[in-house]
Image: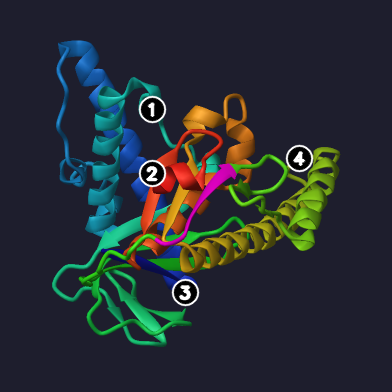
Amino acid sequence: MNRAYKFRIYPNAGQAELFAKTFGCVRFIYNKMLEDKLAHYKATGELLNVTPAKYKAEYAFLKEVDSLALANAQLNLDAAYKNFFKDGGTGFPKFKRKKNTRDSYKTNHVKGNIKLTGSSIILPKTGAVKLKQHREIPEDYILKSVTVSKTPSGKYYASVLFEYERAVEPVEIKKAIGLNYSAAGLYTDSEGGNAQYGQKYRRSLQKLKKMSRALSKMKKSGKNWYKQKRRIALEYEKAANRRMDFLHKQSRQIANAYDLVGLENMNAGARGSGKAAEDKSWGIFRMLLKYKLEEQGKYFVRTDKQADAVNIRD
């Protein structure tokens, strides 16, 4: 089983500069490999297999950053190709644009190149980066990878992925419940209950709308425009944190109270409401609920609309 912990990190000026270079190189190598793959297929009708190593002689700046970050960019591109040919509905791989792409990169743990010390995290090429570790890591957890990211407001995070083995005994199903997506909140359940986002989260959404309208009236790229952009980024982070806190608490409450949970399959029940489902983070809620049930030996099932806990149990 896998478990990820997300920690705030505080790079110094030199480390922040290296992170920026790595973000850019990851985006560059992804786009360059995609460009060459398209050109090769157009010329020959065959797929081209390339690796980042091929480009380091021509683009020396690629040698300055973590090679594993570039290798993961290749893996992401290969996965995008496979998903397209496996299911055309996923769309063909697209070029990554700086303004529309999240600043992040993934590096892998190999022969002790990554270490958590409690007050810092040691990363390849970067060295020890100051870290705020708010949770203890169990001794039997094996470190697998780290994803470094930067938010639009300028904060840095390290998402550390661990692998662990844990014997989980299946529980006897005594209590079951069905959950359906609700456009008015998060969900309604088969017992007549529902979950609604808190007032602070809703106020954040309203505030973001007003701030966005104010931004649209400002001169683009002006001093006030950049200030407003940062204010919006900070407010968006507050809203996202409140939403994740709500989703974690709701999923934990349900996972602790029930032995089997049936969750509405949006493909079956949310015709025309894909954007609304995305806004309410239905997919994130499903993911959180699934792993919290499974780690207790409980059961998670996907259902059609109007899930019935009695039918699920039978």
Q: Give 26 or 232, whichever is nearer the viewer.
A: 232
Q: Gap in Å between the C-alphas at discs 4 and 2?
A: 25 Å
Mark 2 — residue?
A: 27
Give the residue at mark 3.
11
> Which mark sits nearer the N-terminus, 3 or 2?
3
How far apart are the alpha carbons under marks 1 and 2?
20 Å
Pointer 1 residue: 90
Q: Amino acid at mark 4?
A: Lys
Q: Which of the two residues, 308 or 296, is positioned nearer the viewer here?
A: 308
The three-letter code of the residue at mark 2 reads Arg
- Name the mark on residue 220: 4
For the N terminus, which image quadrant? bottom left
Q: Nearer the viewer, residue 59 or 200?
A: 200
**Residue ID at (24%, 44%):** 75
The residue mark sitting in front, 1 or 3, is 1
| Mark 1 or 2, closer to the camera | 1
Q: Which numbered disc flags the more N-terminal residue, 1 or 2?
A: 2
Would you say residue 75 sits in the magenta stretch? no
Image location of residue 288, percent across then percent down: 46, 58
In depth, the one of 158 and 28 nearer the eye is 158
Q: Which of the marked residues, 4 or 2, is nearer the chain's N terminus?
A: 2
Question: Identity of the amino acid at label 1?
Answer: Thr
Labelled pair 3, 2 in contact (Cβ < 8 Å): no
